[in-house]
C-alpha cells in the first residue's frame, strides 16, 4: 500500500518534471506526458481496488490523511476551541470545542494526530492521556447542560500507555467516559476517520451511531501488537490484520457500526474537501432536533444498542 | 508425585503438575495471554513443599492452602481461582451460581479458538473466565462475580461481558449489592471488536445499577489490567485491592515498547494506586470477608 502510494507520488513528480522541461526547452513532450498520465490514472484506480486490511491500516495511518481539525474546519462554522480538564492539564492529543453545524450549535471533540513530525510530538501521536479523556467528558457534560449534540472524531493508535498516564489514572479516565457517555441526554455521533485504536477510541465512541470512513479501521489492538501477543511475532501483522476483522466493511457486516461514509478515489487524503462534504451530508441527515426533544429516551436506547453485542450460546448449566 | 495429589483440594492442580516441567511454576498461568510480563504467578508448590517466589522461604502445601495461598512468612498473596475465592468469601452453602451455561461462539471464525477454549476448560474445570451468582457474606445477601485468571488469562470476551452484565442487571432488579472480584489480562484477543464492545456493555450495566442507587464494590486482585481495568474494575462505589496486586491499564512491556521508555518497578501495584488516589483500601486476604460484610451492613436497606 505505502509502496503504491510512493510509486504514485514519484510518477506525479516525473510528470511535473516533464512539463517543466517542455516549458523551459520549448520542446513538445505532449505524447510522453500523455502516456505517463494514462499510467498514473491507471495506478490511482488500481490503488483503491482490492485494498487488503493491511492496506487500509496503512491508509488510515497516512500522515497526509485529513485529521480532526481539518474536518472541523471544513464541516462546521465558527469553531471555538475549549481547553483543559479543570483537574490537571490540557492534552493536545484531544481537541474539542463548540461550533455550528449549519445553524445548530454542536460540541465537537476528537483525537488529533500531528500533520508533521513536530506537531505529532506535541500531539503525542494522537495517543490521549487521562486529562484528554477528562477534557472530552467535561465538554460532553457541558453539551448535555446546554442541549447540544456531541460529534466525536475518532483517530488514535490507542490511549497513551506510559507511566505518567498510569499515574494519573488512564484506566479510570476511560472507564468513566464509558459509564457517563451511556447516560448522556443529548445525541452522540462518533465518526472513525482514521485509526480507531482500542480503549482510547472506545472512550470517544459510546454513541447513538458509530460511522466509519470507507478506509478507516477500528481494532481492539494494533495488528502488530496482536501478532506479538498472540503469536509472539510482530512480523505476522499482515495476517493479524486480516483475521482481526478491523475494516469498516467487516465491522458493518458484524453489526458493530452503523454506517460507512465513502471516500474519494484513492482515499480521503486525495480530496479532503470532498470527504468532508460527504461527512457533512451524513450529519445533516441526522434528526438532531427530534433526538434533542427526546433526550430522556436516549440513554435507554443507547443501553439497548450495546446490550445486544455479544456472541455466545446459552444452555442449562 | 501421584501420592502428593491428595493434599490438593482441587483436582485441577493435577493438570498443572503434569504440564509443568519447571518445579514450582505454573507456566500455564502465563502462557495464554495478554500480559505475558506479569510477574508473581503463583507457585504451586512442587509436591509437599515449595519455595516462596517472593521471599524464598519453604512453603508447606497444606499450610499454604489453609492460609488461602498467602505466604506465612512474607504475606505474599498468590492468585486464587474463582471457586477458591467463592469458598473463602461466601457463607458455606449459600452460593447459587447463575448463567453457568453460557459458552462463547467464535465470532471472527478465529482459527484454533474452539480448541483453545476446550483445552482451557479441561485445564481449569471452568467454562469461562468468570463465575457469577448470589449468596450470603456473614449473613448479608449479595450478588457476586469472580474472575479467574487461569482461564485464558481472565480475558474478557462475549461471555465474560454478558455474565458480568447479567449479574449487574440481576442486582439492580433485586435491589441487591454486587461485589466483583477482578482478575484479568484484558480483552479476549480472539473475539476482536466483540471483546472491546464488552467494555461499553459492562460499563453501561454499572451505570444503570448506579442510577438505581445500588451498591457496587470492586475488589481488584492480581492481575487486573487492560480492558477490565478500563471498564467495570475502576467504577466501583468502593474499590478495594489485595496487597501487591498488579493493577494497570497497559501492560508494562507494551508500554515500554510503545513509548520507548523504561517504566519504574512497582508502578502498577495496588500500593501505587492507593498512593495516587485510585483505590479506597488495600485489604489483606484474611480480612477481606469481614471488611466486605461490614461494608454490606453499612449499606443495607432495612
Ligand atoms: Zn514469602
Image (tube, coloured by chain):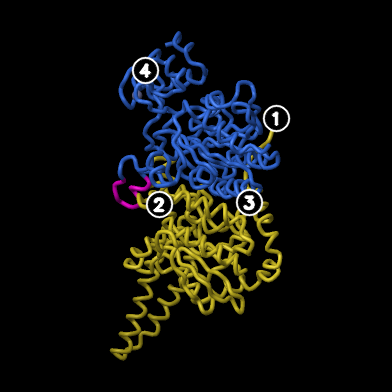
Chain colours: A yellow, B blue
Residue A168 bears which disc, if any?
2
Label 3 residue near ligand 1, CB within 8 Å: no
Q: In this view, does A264 lie above or below B247?
A: below
Label 1 residue near ligand 1, CB within 8 Å: no
Quadrant assignment for the N terminus of chain A: bottom left
Q: How far apart are marks 1 and 4 (CA)?
A: 41 Å
Would you name the residue on which mark 4 appears?
B59
For the point 51% across and 27% down, the residue is B81
Please state which of residues B258 and A37 is positioned toward the viewer in this rendering: B258
State yes or no: discs 4 and 2 in contact (Cβ < 8 Å): no
On the question of residue A5 being in view, the answer is yes
Would you name the residue on which mark 3 appears?
A306
Label 2 residue near ligand 1, CB within 8 Å: no
Q: In the drawing, does residue A294 fall left or right of residue A29?
A: right
- Along the polypeptide, which appears first: circle 2 or circle 1? 2
Q: Give the range drawn in magenta.
A: B254-263
> What kind of element bears circle 2?
loop
The label nearer to you, 4 versus 2, is 2
Q: Is residue B115 above or below residue A175?
A: above
Q: In the drawing, does residue A183 fall left or right of residue B79?
A: right
Q: Distance between the residues labelled 4 and 3?
A: 47 Å
Would you name the residue on which mark 1 appears?
A316
Amino acid at each position: 500500500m505505502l509502496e503504491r502510494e510512493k510509486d504514485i507520488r514519484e510518477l506525479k513528480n516525473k510528470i511535473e518534471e516533464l512539463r517543466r522541461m517542455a516549458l523551459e526547452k520549448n520542446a513538445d513532450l505532449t505524447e510522453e506526458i500523455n502516456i505517463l498520465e494514462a499510467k498514473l490514472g491507471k495506478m490511482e484506480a488500481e490503488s483503491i481496488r482490492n485494498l487488503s486490511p493491511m492496506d487500509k491500516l496503512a491508509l488510515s495511518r497516512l500522515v497526509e490523511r485529513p485529521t480532526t481539525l481539518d474536518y472541523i474546519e471544513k464541516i462546521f462554522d465558527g469553531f471555538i476551541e475549549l481547553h483543559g480538564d479543570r483537574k490537571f492539564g490540557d492534552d493536545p492529543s484531544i481537541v474539542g470545542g463548540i461550533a455550528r453545524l449549519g445553524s445548530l450549535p454542536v460540541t465537537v471533540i476528537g483525537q488529533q494526530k500531528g500533520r508533521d513530525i513536530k506537531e505529532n510530538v506535541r500531539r503525542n501521536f494522537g495517543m490521549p492521556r487521562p486529562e484528554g479523556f477528562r477534557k472530552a467528558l467535561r465538554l460532553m457534560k457541558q453539551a448535555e447542560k446546554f442541549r447540544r449534540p456531541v460529534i466525536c472524531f475518532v483517530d488514535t493508535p490507542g490511549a497513551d500507555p506510559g507511566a505518567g498516564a498510569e499515574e494519573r489514572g488512564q484506566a479510570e479516565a476511560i472507564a468513566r467516559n464509558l459509564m457517563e457517555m451511556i447516560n448522556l441526554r443529548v445525541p452522540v455521533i462518533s465518526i472513525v476517520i482514521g485509526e480507531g485504536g482500542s480503549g482510547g477510541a472506545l472512550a470517544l465512541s459510546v454513541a447513538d451511531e458509530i460511522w466509519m470512513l470507507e478506509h478507516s479501521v477500528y481494532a481492539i489492538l494494533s495488528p502488530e501488537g496482536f501478532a506479538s501477543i498472540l503469536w509472539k511475532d510482530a512480523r505476522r501483522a499482515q495476517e493479524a490484520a486480516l483475521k482481526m476483522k478491523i475494516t469498516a466493511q467487516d465491522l458493518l457486516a458484524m453489526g458493530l457500526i452503523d454506517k460507512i461514509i465513502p471516500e474519494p478515489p484513492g482515499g480521503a487524503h486525495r480530496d479532503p474537501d470532498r470527504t468532508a462534504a460527504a461527512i457533512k451530508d451524513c450529519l445533516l441527515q441526522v434528526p438532531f432536533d427530534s433526538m434533542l426533544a427526546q433526550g430522556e429516551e436516549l440513554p435507554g436506547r443507547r443501553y439497548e444498542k450495546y446490550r445486544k453485542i455479544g456472541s455466545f450460546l446459552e444452555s442449562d448449566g | 508425585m501421584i501420592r502428593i495429589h491428595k493434599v490438593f483440594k482441587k483436582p485441577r492442580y493435577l493438570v498443572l503438575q503434569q504440564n509443568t516441567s519447571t518445579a514450582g511454576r505454573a507456566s500455564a498461568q502465563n502462557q495464554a495471554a495478554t500480559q505475558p510480563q506479569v510477574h508473581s504467578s503463583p507457585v504451586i508448590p512442587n509436591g509437599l513443599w515449595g519455595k516462596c517466589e517472593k521471599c524464598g522461604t519453604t512453603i508447606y502445601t497444606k499450610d499454604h492452602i489453609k492460609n488461602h495461598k498467602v505466604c506465612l512468612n512474607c504475606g505474599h498473596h498468590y492468585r486464587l481461582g474463582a471457586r477458591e475465592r467463592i469458598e473463602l468469601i461466601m457463607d458455606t452453602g449459600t452460593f447459587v451460581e447463575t448463567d453457568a451455561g453460557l459458552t462463547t461462539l467464535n465470532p471472527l471464525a478465529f482459527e484454533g479458538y474452539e480448541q483453545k477454549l476446550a483445552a482451557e476448560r479441561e485445564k481449569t474445570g471452568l467454562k469461562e473466565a468468570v463465575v457469577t451468582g448470589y449468596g450470603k457474606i456473614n449473613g448479608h445477601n449479595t450478588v457476586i462475580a469472580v474472575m479467574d485468571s487461569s482461564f485464558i488469562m481472565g480475558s474478557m470476551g462475549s461471555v465474560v461481558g454478558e455474565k458480568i452484565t447479567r449479574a449487574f442487571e440481576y442486582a439492580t432488579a433485586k435491589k441487591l449489592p454486587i461485589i466483583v472480584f477482578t482478575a484479568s489480562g484484558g480483552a479476549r484477543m480472539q473475539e476482536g471488536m466483540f471483546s472491546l464492545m464488552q467494555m461499553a456493555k459492562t460499563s453501561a450495566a454499572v451505570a444503570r445499577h448506579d442510577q438505581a442507587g445500588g451498591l457496587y464494590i470492586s475488589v481488584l486482585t492480581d492481575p487486573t489490567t487492560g480492558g477490565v481495568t478500563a471498564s467495570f474494575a475502576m467504577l466501583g462505589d468502593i474499590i478495594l485491592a489485595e496487597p501487591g496486586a498488579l493493577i494497570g491499564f497497559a501492560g508494562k512491556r507494551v508500554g515500554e515498547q510503545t513509548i520507548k521508555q523504561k517504566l519504574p518497578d512497582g508502578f502498577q501495584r495496588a500500593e501505587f494506586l492507593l498512593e495516587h488516589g485510585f483505590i479506597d483500601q488495600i485489604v489483606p486476604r484474611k480480612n477481606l470477608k469481614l471488611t466486605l460484610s461490614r461494608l454490606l451492613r453499612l449499606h443495607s436497606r432495612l
